[in-house]
Image (cartoon, grey):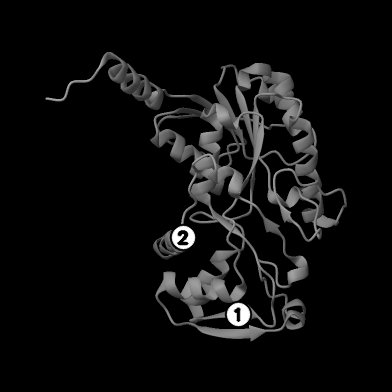
Amino acid sequence: MIKCSYFCYYTIHAYYEKAVIAMNILVLGGSYFLGYGFVKLAVSEGHAVTVFNRGTRPLNMEGVSEIRGDRTSEADLRKIDAAFDATADFCAYEKGDIRLVKDVLGDRTGRYVFISTVDVYERGTGKVLDESSAFETRDFGGEAGAYILGKVSLEKEIESYPDRCVLRPSIIYGPGNYAPRENIYFKWISAAGQILQPKPSDGFFQMVSVGDVAKAALEACRSDSFAGRAFNVTSSDTYTYEDFTNILKEVTGTDFEVIGVTPEEAFMQQVPFPYPIMKAESEKYDGSALEKTGFVYTDIIEGMKEAWENYVHSK
């Protein structure tokens, strides 16, 4: 029998206690895709979760308390009467969204984890964009422009709260994705045995699995090393449309037909290409800061295979 010193015993015991400490987490949003994935992960690791949203898609999940309300309503926010170790905010989009929550709940939010986006960075600089890069100030119009400036405003809003963490994911993919991205290709492959691909195309893009962003958000809730910081949440690997086609062939196990479409034809026919087509539209993000905390990104083949299998089984 191996004997353990008092110090050894104490260290192991302290680590075990730390590992099993359950948090009380408030989730704003949480019905769809990333928020839903985060709630499932947090519950699976033994944390108590309270979800606050409009209740259009009740979770009915064991270990989850649900409060219906509109985050823009002070009266509805006052329905939240508990104190939390952390708050994960998946649905802040407009200036004032975070301030109102903090005005009502104050320190009861615990650590405030805000899900932002890499789109907050200034475009067209030609630089690799890390967490210190300048924010975008231009209004590109439409929903996309409002989304970007809304997230920028919220990033500035949250700076005044010391116990915070901001996560900036790149393009998120994975099971439950409601955005018209990888599922477009899954549909083309399963329905027609073919995909459309822009040609010529020198654009590139970065992706991150929904599971990785959920894991990063949970780590941001519990790790003191994340407090007061912002992280790009993305593998530093970049992909072209040709790369993406090869990935799809590997994960689906099919030799589908690839039909080239010029950018002009795509525009005229309203083909929904979901990623940057040309290099001038593309940006490169540095995701290494999160990796330096010990975080490991999911391999693109593994993650996309999970997304494909989920799509097939849900049909």
Q: Quadrant of the N terminus?
A: top left
- The residue at which mark 1 appears reads as 196
Q: Position of residue 24 (x, y in %)?
A: 50, 23
- The residue at which mark 2 appears reads as 307
In the depicted view, which residue is nearer to us: 12 or 69? 12
Label 1 SS: strand
- Residue at image x 57%, y 43%? 290
> Label 2 amino acid?
Ala
Q: Is residue 81 left or right of residue 99?
A: left
Q: Position of residue 108 (x, y in %)?
A: 62, 18
Q: Position of residue 263 (x, y in %)?
A: 74, 79
Q: Is residue 115 left or right of residue 96?
A: left
Residue 39 visible? The answer is yes
In the depicted view, which residue is nearer to us: 200 or 89? 200
> Label 1 amino acid?
Leu
Marks 1 and 2: CB-CB under 8 Å?
A: no
Q: Is residue 214 left or right of residue 170?
A: left
Label 2 SS: helix
Q: Quadrant of the C terminus?
A: bottom left
CA distance for labels 1 and 2: 19 Å
Q: Position of residue 136 (x, y in %)?
A: 82, 49
In the depicted view, which residue is nearer to us: 306 or 63? 306
Would you call the spot at circle 1 few (<14 residues within 10 Å), some (14-19), or many (20 or more)? many
- Residue at image x 61%, y 25%? 111
Q: Is residue 112 left or right of residue 127?
A: left
Using the image, determine if residue 186 lies above or below residue 142: below
